[in-house]
Image (cartoon, rainbow, N blue to C red):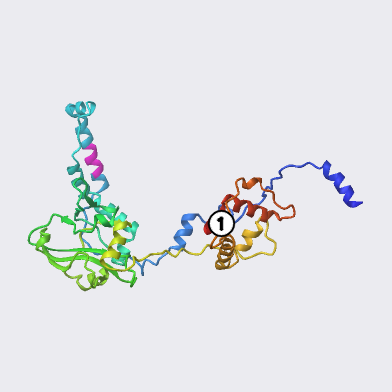
Amino acid sequence: MTSRLFRYMKNDLITGNIQQIRFYRRGKPPHLAKTLKQRLEELNYKDPEISFKVDIGFKSHRFSRGKLTEDYSEYVKKVRSNPEMEKKARRKELLIDLDQMRKDWWISTAPSQIKTIADHYGVYDDLFGDAYFHPVLPLDIKYDFGDEEKIATVHRGNILLPSETSNPPTITYDAEPDTLWTLLLTTPDGNFSDRKFEYCHWFIGNIPGNDVKKGDVILQFFDLVSRNWETKEFYRKYQDVITPAGLAFYQATWDQSVQDFYHNELDMKAPMFEYDFPKPYIRPQEWFPKAQPFNLYMDKYRDPKKINQEFLMKKMKTVHPFKESPPPLRYPNAQPLPKDMPSWLKLETKKERQGFGRVNDIK
């Protein structure tokens, strides 16, 4: 009798999508909660008396903001009072001297901007630890890789291919002839035998002025013997007689020449690098989780190897050593499913038939 009355009453009920409204604020109110910036500063806090950076380089040019503003105002007045420059600008004949612009950049904001870029890539942390310097010496580094129309140039973090950097580069810089210089080409994060060391690819010392060819080659370019290196320990040993002055770096990506070099020259397999991502946070399991898919929720707390084994066994059931695998359904959504099948299993079966989700891992 009760079930019959319920069926009668159910037909009179108003059906529709009922949206739940939250009448409370989750978390602390805005005047008490911390901003993202405050939380990051708290997480990344370092004691300034213990962890601080030391400048080990030459002093860079410093300009006062008032002097720069004054020079800029005078330059604008000079340009506006020049009728010839206005005519050239209207006729699109006004050319910018890029060489002069680069010189002005180097004597003004280049050292500070390059230091900011190097900090972003973690160059100083990997090479010098708690030390840094302002690159005040412009370095012009070019790789000739046999192309008549192209040449690979090293800037500040640009991407180059190993095939473009397989030969020693041509390095030019301005220096007095009575000074001695050192050139170092190193990889801070590519050592796959000992992570605390770098790989030194090229080392030339006692270079008179800017004549690189007259320097003492301590380590040949891409020498494969005794390449483990520590820039920090090298500087710590000779810090009284050397001062870092210039910096240029690039990022190398993989190409076919790497595999050919390992297979043909070294007669070994190419190394593989993997990044261990931090495990995602999974909240503690609940007895009665709300609005959670049954199968996906339970898989969060299972061993991934067990799940992969189930998918592999499911795939092996359809594989025969002497017969072809059954063809996929032509109209997967038109195939009926058992009426007593659970809803989560129906959804999982539809995804498998259409090739959605984790089923692609075993194909």
Q: Is residue 183 left or right of residue 311?
A: left
Is 73 included in the stretch rendered in magenta? Answer: yes
Tell me which amino acid carries mark 1.
Ser
Examine the rendered structure and indicate whether residue 97 appears above or below residue 188: above
Residue at image point 55% right, 59% down: 323
Q: Position of residue 93 (x, y in %)?
A: 20, 29
Q: Which of 97/324 is in front?
A: 324
- Label 1, secondary structure: give it: loop
Q: Which of 259/86 is in front?
A: 259
Q: Position of residue 221 (x, y in %)?
A: 19, 64
Residue at image point 74% right, 55% down: 340
Extreme-right residue of the structure: 1
Is 150 included in the stretch rendered in magenta? Answer: no
Q: Is residue 8 visible?
A: yes
Magenta segment range? 68-74
Examine the rendered structure and indicate whether residue 141 appears above or below residue 48: above
Residue at image mark 1: 325
Examine the rendered structure and indicate whether residue 354 appears above or below residue 43: above
